[in-house]
Each structure stands twice: as structure tokens, then as C-alpha cells.
Image (tube, helix red, strand yellow):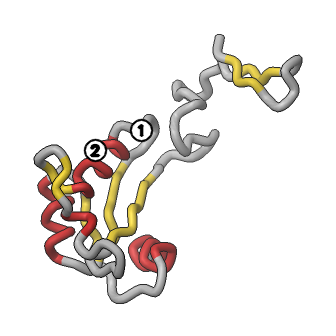
Amino acid sequence: MRRRRTNNPRESIDYGCVVDGRDPLGVGWRPGLSFVAIIIPARFGAQRFPGKPLADLAGKPLIAHVVERAQRARGVNVVAVATDDERIARAVEQAGGEAILTGPAATGTDRVAQAAR
């Protein structure tokens, strides 16, 4: 039986149940929710580190590592990267993720909103 501690050390929440054959500790899972998507915003142009998503880390682009980690999350149906750059889109697809090309966006949240439409 799994228990998660709360702020009160004498109190705990029982997460040992399984609803609809699913583990309630899975990322993003809620009763009645049947589809979970992770949308990761990524852009090439940055003032401090231009091209960061394509920077090499252990022989792979950084965005490939992010996609792979997101794909490991329990309860996730699709991992997508919202980007306005073809190079990032290619790297994501090579890593097994889905790339969604967006237009210009002021923030990462705006980019995710464009991709979710």
C-alpha cells in the first residue's frame, strides 16, 4: 500500500487503490481522464544561449533528452514539442517525439497554446 506524507506527520493519504485498472500515481492521471499529452515549448533563438535545444549533451541534442524523459512518464499518451524552428522539429522526430510547428510566440505558454489548438 502506498502512502504519501502530508504536512502533518500523523496524517497520510492512501494511494493504494487502483481505479479503472490505472495507477493513480501516474503523471497527469485523474479518474475519467483518458488522454494525457505533454507539450514542451522550444525555441532556437535566445539571448543567453542561442540554439540551446540542439546543444549536444552526451551525443544527442538536449531536446532529445527532454523528449525521452517525458516519454518515460506513466500515464502519458503523447509527447510533443511546440517549436517554430525546422531544425528542432527534425531533432524531435528523430528522438521519437512529435513536433508541432507554431508561429512566433511571446512566451512558452503562448507557444503551447498555439500547439494545443
The amino acid type of the residue labelled 1 equals: Ala
Please identify the quarter of the rendering in which residue 13 is found: top right
Number of the label disc, if any, that sits on residue 26 = none
The image position of residue 2, as x and y in percent, is 64, 16
User: Is 25 in front, or is 21?
Assistant: 25
Establish if 24 lies above or below 104: above
Which residue appears at 52% of the width and 28% of the height? Answer: 22
Task: Give the residue pinned by disc 1.
Answer: 73
Establish if 47 lies above or below 20: below
The amino acid type of the residue labelled 2 equals: Glu
Which structural element holds mark 2? helix
Horizontal placement of 19 versus 67: left or right? right
Task: Give the residue pinned by disc 2.
Answer: 68
* Marks 2 and 1 in Cβ contact (< 8 Å): no
Horizontal placement of 59 versus 32: left or right? left
Which residue appears at 57% of the width and 46% of the height? Answer: 33
User: Is 61 in front, or is 92?
Assistant: 61
- Quadrant of image for the C terminus: bottom left
Please identify the quarter of the rendering in which residue 38 is found: bottom left
Horizontal placement of 65 versus 15: left or right? left
Which structural element holds mark 1? loop
